[in-house]
Amino acid sequence: MIFDGKPTSEIRPEEIKALISDHIEEDAFLDYKACPYPGNDHGKQEMIKDVSAFANGEGGYIIVGIREDEEQPRCAGQIVDVQNPDKERRRMIDLCFEKIEPRLPELDIRAIPVDDKTVLVCRVPDGPQKPYCARPDREHHYFWRRYEDGNRLMTVPEIRACLEGDRVLRELSELRGELVRFREQQTVAREMEQGVDDSNAFEVQSLQRFRQFVDSTFNAATDGKPYYRLTATPLPVNHSIDQHILREKTREIYALLERPPELRPGGWDMASDFNRGANITSLGVLRNDIGYKHLRVLWNGHVEFWTEVDDWFFRFSAVPGSTDVERKFLYPLAISEPIENFILFVKEICRLASFDGELEFTLGFHRFRGFYLAPGFPETIGYYRARSDAGFDHGPKPFPEDSLIPPPIRKSVSDLPNQISWRFVSEIYRRFDYPQQEAVPFFDADHKFTVGN
């Protein structure tokens, strides 16, 4: 295989230039793209087709920034500078994460400078969970595979061979996963027997058990009312941050709690209007207003923000021809803007702690049954029509469950914010049975939050 199958971090600029000088031809392991994939539907479909095809084959490299030779088609001709390589890298990763099933966490993409230009090298692994499905939309499923002469749709026998041929590896992987889960369960069980409280919370090794501890604090403080909650936890939970570093930064943390960063004045931020100050406890520093925009930083770097879901979140709407109480519609900005402000705050805490590792983010609407959400921008006709249609068969339906909690998201500090808001918010709209692209407001084509930027 080209580059001996090594990760992109080990590929040198001289190896990229050698592709040009040696007129290396595309094959089952190598594909050239002169320019980044377009942001339109066709470009997105082409990207997930190429990546999934390599994963269903034996892996390989997609190099963005190499144009084919005019006289020798499929051979490397010249280097074309990739503009905004970091943005293109993030876009490729996020789209593949969203549109390829099962996910490819081993996908490896890096910008490599070559003289005065930059290329993107995408290393697609030999997928351990074949076959991989490219899903450009809800209605279509494609299984592509890379061959010497390009990508072709897999036949039914090829798909069946993938499923049967990977059975042993899959069983071994499942066994390993079971052993890891068993070890984690044993740790959790031991810590459950010992009990976790303020005195030993930072000795907990299991993220699950630590979350149970902070969740119990949250539930006790919120007293069964509807709440919006954001958390960020550095990983691993018990020794990722030196607690003494944050203790020494108490004054800076206190100042951040009083004036947290915000995207725009007067927006849906985390600042308190009551000026009640903050408390320093054995666990960390917390702002005193439990019910309204509560914010806390624990000495191990765990950060929480929560606020009661009250008039701050709602736009009310009466049902035409009904004497019912006005229905509570969540305001779109109240859902998404706090996430962006929270990430700004978390980045500041990580800077104070000199932490550049991985964090796990969570979002939750707790005690949420019966709330409404209208699709699209609040200024549009469709938004107002949805609000007026509430309660009818063709209108929005109230959320039927007690809580809405999207899956956690893990990101390194250096990769923030990188679509965290989009992934959380789009999942919320999906749970309300809306088509994401049409329903979710305040995000651009690259899924970047547009308000205040």
Image: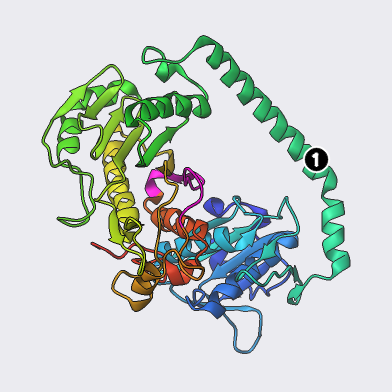
Q: Nearer the viewer, residue 281 or 105?
A: 281
Q: Position of residue 308 (x, y in %)?
A: 29, 41
Residue found 42% across the figure and 56% down from its top:
425
Q: Nearer the viewer, residue 416 or 83?
A: 416
Q: Position of residue 205 (x, y in %)?
A: 50, 22
Query: What type is the residue that disc 1 sits on?
Result: Glu
Check disc 1 and report the residue beneath it: 171
Task: Give left or right: position of 452 versus 325.
Answer: left
Residue found 40% across the figure and 60% down from its top:
373
Residue 162 colored in magenta in the image: no
| Magenta region | 398-414
Q: Position of residue 45 (x, y in %)?
A: 59, 74
> Looking at the rendering, which quadrant does residue 185 occupy?
top right
Residue found 55% across the figure and 11% down from its top:
193
Residue found 47% across the figure and 64% down from its top:
91
Residue 407 colored in magenta in the image: yes
Give the answer, above or below, for where 278 lies relative to 312: above
> Looking at the rendering, which quadrant does residue 299 occupy?
top left
Q: Nearer the viewer, residue 331 or 63?
A: 331
Q: Position of residue 78 (x, y in %)?
A: 52, 78
Residue 12 visible to an observer of this rendering = no
- In the picture, the quarter occupied by the C terminus is bottom left
Residue 197 visible to an observer of this rendering = yes
